[in-house]
Image: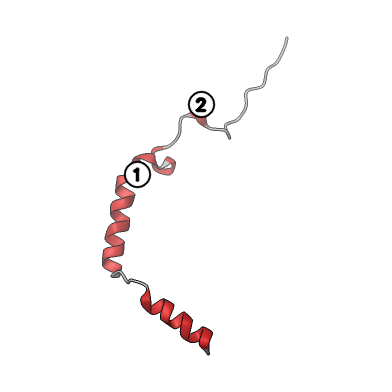
Amino acid sequence: MKKVVQQLRLEASVSRVKVSQAAADLKQFCLQNAHHDPLLTGIASSMNPFRTQKLCSFL
């Protein structure tokens, strides 16, 4: 019972944020950092470690 009470006290002491405020903060963060996101901006083919390798062939 002591552990349960301790856990409830811990959870009660956590500061709460409204969902609308958290969503607004998340949206602002995403918009500010969109230019660093490779899924949105893409990456240069020279920097892509997964590009297909060119084969050297000797004649």
Name the colour scheme: secondary structure
Q: Where in the figure is residue 53, as x and y percent of width and height?
A: 62, 27
Horizontal relation, residue 26 to residue 9: left or right: left
Above/below status of 32 relative to 55: below
Horizontal relation, residue 15 to residue 56: left or right: left
Q: Classify 10 Å Cα crowding around label 1: few (below 14), some (14-19), many (20 and above).
A: few
Closer-to-camera residue (51/36): 36
Q: Where in the figure is residue 55, as x and y percent of width and height?
A: 67, 21
| Residue type indicated by callout 1 | Ala
Closer-to-camera residue (38/26): 26
Q: CA distance from mark 2 to mark 1?
A: 21 Å
Circle 1 SS class: helix
State the quadrant of the C terminus.
top right
Figure label count: 2
Closer-to-camera residue (45/31): 31
Above/below status of 23 relative to 10: above
Horizontal relation, residue 21 to residue 49: left or right: left
Q: Disc 1 designates what residue? A: 34
Q: Disc 2 designates what residue? A: 46
Q: Which quadrant holds residue 42? A: top left
| Residue type indicated by callout 2 | Ser
Closer-to-camera residue (11/48): 11
List the single residue furthest toward the bottom. Answer: 1
Q: Residue at x 28, y 70 (%)?
A: 18
Q: Residue at x 40, y 42 (%)?
A: 37
User: In terms of sequence position, does the residue under pointer 2 or pointer 1 come before the other?
Assistant: 1
Q: Residue at x 32, y 72 (%)?
A: 16
| Residue 4 - label | none
Circle 2 SS class: helix
Above/below status of 36 relative to 55: below
Q: Where in the figure is residue 40, as x and y percent of width and height?
A: 39, 42
